[in-house]
Amino acid sequence: MVENGSSCNFSKITDFPESNLPFTYSWLIRDFQELYAKMKGGESIFSETFVSPASSPPFHQHSTFVYNHFKWKLRLYPRGFLEDTCVSLYLLPEIAKLETQRSSKSRSSSYQFDIFRLDDVEIRGSYVLKKLECIQKCIKHDFKLDILRQKGLDKFCKLDQIFPDNDKTRKTDLVIRVQFTDIPKDIIDIIDIQPSGNRVCDDLISSPSLEKYLLNETFSDVTFTFNCGRRLKASRIILASRSLHFEHMFAVQHKDPSNSCIIPINDTTYELFEILIYYLYTRNLQKSLSLEVMQKLYCEAKTRSIHELAKFLTIHLIKMINENTWDELLMMAWQTANRELKEAALNYVYKHWEDVKKSGRVEKIMLYENVEWMEELMKARFYGVGKYKFVQCLE
């Protein structure tokens, strides 16, 4: 017998991804029919504790920071909390270490529940889920941490959805999912995305715009030359103070005083390099950059270890994911090991699968014959974003 409010060791099927929201946690419950038979009305089981979200790495390269996160559990009443014709599902907060250190009194979150049934356990290494009808309501709640009360749905899903033909003895495996749909302000301790969407501010690098010095020969002491014959003048101190790449470049060039004022750039175009320099001066991107230019600029930023620009571009690329770009950006994410972009593209696949499968773009990805890519794509199609592992419930 599982006592009221006791914990049962059911395993999650996702490890939380190291990315910003939306964040999804999925909970696999094996043999729900046995739980239903054993338990009485008002008795419940808990998921294991999970964490949301896993913050992205900060832009600053020379310090160590402590990231904020929230800890949670799901609580399920197989025979309902108030009514025995429905299962009840709730979200329960747990106090995280940083919240204790800050003496936090509350946390606000918006979230939504889903439920699936595994009708076929395994087919060719993948799992087939059937989405069940349930109350799909976006819940917005201010959790008081001194009380730790649960918040959820008393009549989350009717039992006749879970047990077809009212057969409560048939093996039934369920997946319960909660998706957080907001980014609480108190989570964003390091990275602040301004409402305009055009600027990323790192509170720890309070770098003002120096646009008035850009292309100003009075304050320029180095000239970059390009294969096309064009030249670009800039300030060493500005570039070196905002990029380790340029600091190292100027240190190497200084060893040859006869040629230290002119530096040839042979590995990129004038146009891309100019955009990169513009960003270092202004902490902004030029307006109306195309997807192709942003992709190339991202590679430039990664090559030159300008991580802040790479992060900034990732935010913009994520906003550009749509029915015409998701596959291109997903493959870019795989090829550049960009986890945030990858999970955003996979999340698009999950939410728009009916349109995705008709587009012919999945077949284009299949032509690469990359097994790992296809595994991730299919897992995202069925379960959403994350890593997946199935572990049998320990009685």
Image (tube, rainbow, N blue to C red):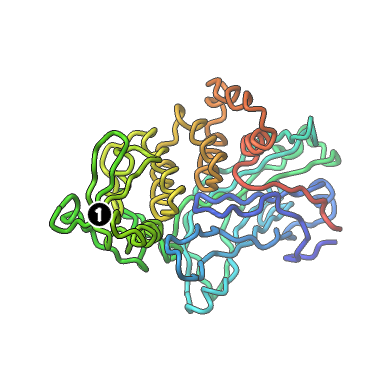
Q: Which residue is mark 1?
A: 222
**As displayed, is residue 267 above or below residue 308?**
above
**As displayed, is residue 311 above or below residue 254?**
above
Residue that sits furthest to the front in the current view: 258
Image coordinates of residue 1 in percent, x first then y, are 85, 61
In front here: 224 or 126?
Answer: 224
The 10 Å Cα crowd at callout 1, few under 14, some 14 to 19, many 20 or more, is: some
The disc labelled 1 sits on which kind of residue?
A: Val
Query: Is disc 1 placed on a helix, strand or loop?
Result: strand
In front here: 163 or 267?
Answer: 267
Residue 274's quadrant in the figure?
A: top left
Asked if residue 19 lies left or right of residue 393, the reply is: left
Seen at 75% across and 54% down, the residue is 11
Quadrant where the image shows the C terminus: bottom right
- Marks counted in the figure total 1
**As displayed, is residue 186 above or below residue 315?**
below
Image coordinates of residue 176 in percent, x first then y, are 67, 47
